[in-house]
Amino acid sequence: MIKASIATAAVSLAAVALPAVASADASDDYPIPNRILKTTCTVDQYMAAVRDTEPVYYQRYMIDYNNRPADIQQGARDRIYWFFSLDYAGRRQYSEDTATNVYYEQMATHWGNWAKLFFNNKGVAAHGTDVCASYPPNDPSVWNWG
């Protein structure tokens, strides 16, 4: 009984003393899919690709987008263009920051799903990034759905 108690105490001490990876740390696909972190496509290319490969997700996003005030729409566009302007290291750091600090992304305080089309679905990201390079890099019409 004493040996079991000592062993239990030793395991407990080791668990407390050894650092562990926090469960909120970002991974290659959380909170932002790795394909989005690595893509060289522009926002417009990606949105056009998603419009054609995952029309239901594109439609849902655009309905939600169009239900926002004009300043929130502009803020979401500005923020996602800023994100896509970052290199891989910058995007990876942004992913880490959003995974570990709920207050990091201020755009989310105005519209919780502002980046849903880009960040929240690995399948959509995979399908969009597979073909996005074949779309024009500058096509602002992707923001007009109706």
Image (spheres, rainbow, N blue to C red):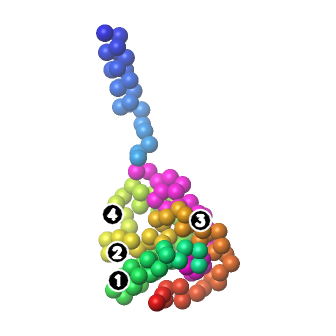
- What SS does tag 1 mark? loop
The residue sitting at 53% across, 62% down in the picture is: 122
Residue stretch in magenta: 24-51
- What SS does tag 4 mark? loop
On the image, the x and y values in percent for residue 69 come to: 33, 86
The residue sitting at 44% across, 81% down in the picture is: 62
For marks 3 and 4, give the CA distance: 27 Å
CB-based contact (under 8 Å), mark 1 and mark 2 = yes
**Comparing marks 3 and 4, which lies closer to the viewer?**
3
CB-based contact (under 8 Å), mark 3 and mark 1 = no
Q: Along the horizontal axis of the image, is 78 left or right of 28? A: left
> Considering only order in the chain, which callout, 2 or 1, is on the residue closer to the N terminus?
1
What amino acid type is highlighted by mark number 2? Trp
Above or below, 65 against 24 in this view is: below
> Considering only order in the chain, which callout, 4 or 3, is on the residue closer to the N terminus?
4
Could you classify mark 3 by the number of other residues whose Cα lies within 10 Å: few (under 14), some (14-19), or many (20 or more)? some
What amino acid type is highlighted by mark number 3? Ala
Residue at which label 4 appears? 103
The residue sitting at 40% across, 74% down in the picture is: 114
Residue at which label 2 appears? 111
For marks 3 and 2, give the CA distance: 24 Å
Task: Work out which residue is located at the far right of the displayed protein and give it.
Answer: 134
The residue sitting at 55% across, 67% down in the picture is: 125
> Considering only order in the chain, which callout, 1 or 3, is on the residue closer to the N terminus?
1
Camera sees residue 71: no
> Considering only order in the chain, which callout, 1 or 4, is on the residue closer to the N terminus?
1
On the image, the x and y values in percent for residue 102 come to: 34, 60
Residue at which label 3 appears? 126
